Image (tube, rainbow, N blue to C red):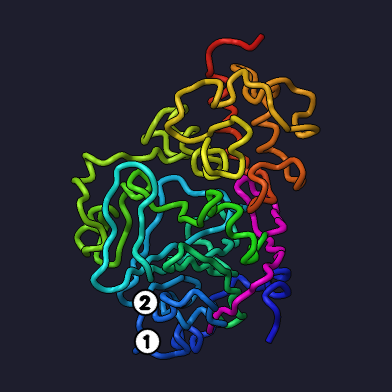
């Protein structure tokens, strides 16, 4: 069997649907009787194959959830080299999540979350075929979450565990019509806590009231995700969606002004480290959550603590009206590991995201000393 790293390196010739046999087999080794999450309660040793979870399969070039597995999406997700993502969740029967308006949802023991990553041949086209490369799994055990990645084989019959991670080299057409060839990181098990750890235990990044307060196009039709989860019994105590918080969609002006969308983007892409408390960047004094109100904590006229050469000689993290003089903008444009922010999970500049952040900085009032 060909290694996935070799497969994706020649991606230009592979933008075709998987063979019909693979679609029929799907996940779970072709079985239609497996139960979702059967491996979910045991996080001592991850199974070798993704099919052990009976969570998703790939049919054609689409990720398909198994019966009882709920797909979802986020208002403003993390940028990952323009990868397409497909998220699912499964809760053990009889369990549920207690709704909270702010902060992360606390999932019951045995919960399994998957996030599949793939690359569209041309990201400008919504119907462009996708080459799926990996599915990441988070499992909620008695002592917290643990995660690992699984690499899909050529036929999409199954995906195999990769403990040490991989670097893949897909090739696709980017948003400006350019050819993009990122050094895409499939994280190792040891790297999962770098983003999913608050210094004490691992946690989930995406699922929260404000991120899930959005419409998802389910098989039965469009429905608000919070309402859908509540109707299925996965979520208890949730108010009507109109009474729940909602995070702006970073690239949809109808959901918020430039400030709201830029802050949403910073929260999704930077806030898990720059959260002012348990995140890896807690000692920097730079807090990039959506609720921070202190201008200095947001970086406005704030001198860096330990940026070194990454400051490029500039004095402040954010200079109102001057994105080119702002360290924050410089860091999100860089791709070298010693300079780029976020530090992991991105090898390309997110052109559109940088443009949004630059627009936000340009509109900020005032000046720095």
Position of the C terminus, as image quadrant, is top right
Dot 1 or dot 2, earlier in sequence? 1
Q: Is residue 135 visible?
A: yes
The x and y percentages for residue 39 are 44, 79
Task: Decide whether residue 166 is among the magenta residues.
Answer: yes
The numbered mark at residue 66 is 2
Task: Give the total of numbered labels.
Answer: 2
The x and y percentages for residue 70 are 33, 66
Viewer-proximal residue, 260 or 302? 302
Cα–Cα gap, marks 1 and 2: 9 Å
Viewer-proximal residue, 175 or 193? 193
Q: Is residue 132 visible?
A: no
Vertical order, 219 against 273 (above or below): below
Are discs 1 and 2 less than 8 Å apart at CB? yes
Quadrant of the rendered image containing residue 113 = bottom left
Task: Give the left or right position of residue 1, taking residue 16 as reference.
Answer: right
Viewer-proximal residue, 335 or 105? 105
- Residue drawn at point x = 54 percent, y = 53 percent: 197
Q: Nearer the viewer, mark 1 or mark 2?
A: 1
Residue for badge 1: 34
Q: Which residues are magenta?
A: 157-184
The x and y percentages for residue 136 are 53, 67
Viewer-proximal residue, 167 or 2? 167
Vertical order, 183 against 326 (above or below): below
- Residue drawn at point x = 61 percent, y = 10 percent: 367
Position of the N terminus, as image quadrant, is bottom right
Task: Decide whether residue 49 is among the magenta residues.
Answer: no
The numbered mark at residue 137 is none
């Amino acid at each position: 069997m060909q290694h996935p790293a070799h497969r994706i390196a020649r991606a230009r010739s592979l933008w075709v649907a998987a063979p019909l046999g693979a679609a029929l087999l799907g996940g779970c080794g072709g079985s239609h009787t497996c139960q979702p999450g059967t491996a979910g309660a045991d996080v001592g040793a991850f199974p070798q194959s993704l099919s052990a979870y009976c969570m998703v399969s790939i049919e054609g070039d689409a990720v398909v959830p198994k019966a009882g597995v709920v797909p979802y999406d986020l208002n403003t997700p993390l940028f990952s080299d323009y990868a397409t993502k497909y998220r699912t969740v499964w809760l053990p029967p009889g369990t549920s999540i207690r709704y909270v308006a702010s902060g992360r949802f606390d999932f019951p023991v045995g919960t399994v979350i998957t996030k599949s990553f793939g690359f569209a041949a041309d990201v400008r086209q919504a119907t462009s075929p996708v080459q799926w490369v990996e599915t990441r799994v988070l499992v909620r055990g008695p002592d917290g979450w643990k995660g690992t990645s699984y690499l899909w084989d050529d036929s999409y019959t199954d995906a195999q565990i990769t403990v040490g991670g991989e670097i893949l080299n897909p090739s696709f057409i980017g948003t400006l019509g350019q050819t993009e060839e990122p050094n895409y990181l499939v994280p190792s098990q040891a790297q999962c806590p770098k983003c999913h750890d608050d210094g004490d235990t691992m946690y989930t990044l995406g699922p929260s009231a404000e991120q899930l307060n959005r419409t998802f196009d389910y098989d039965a039709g469009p429905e608000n995700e919070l309402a859908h989860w509540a109707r299925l019994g996965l979520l208890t105590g949730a108010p009507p969606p109109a009474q729940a918080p909602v995070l702006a969609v970073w690239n949809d002006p109808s959901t918020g002004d430039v400030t709201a969308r830029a802050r949403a983007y910073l929260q999704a892409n930077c806030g898990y480290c720059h959260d002012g408390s348990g995140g890896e960047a807690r000692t920097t004094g730079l807090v990039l959550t959506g609720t921070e109100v202190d201008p200095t904590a947001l970086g406005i006229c704030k001198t860096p603590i330990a940026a070194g050469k990454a400051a490029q000689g500039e004095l402040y993290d954010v200079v109102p009206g001057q994105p080119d003089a702002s360290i924050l903008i410089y860091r999100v444009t860089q791709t070298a590991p010693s300079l780029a922010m976020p530090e992991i999970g991105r090898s390309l500049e997110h052109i559109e995201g940088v443009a949004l952040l630059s627009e936000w900085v340009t509109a900020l009032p005032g000046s720095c000393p």
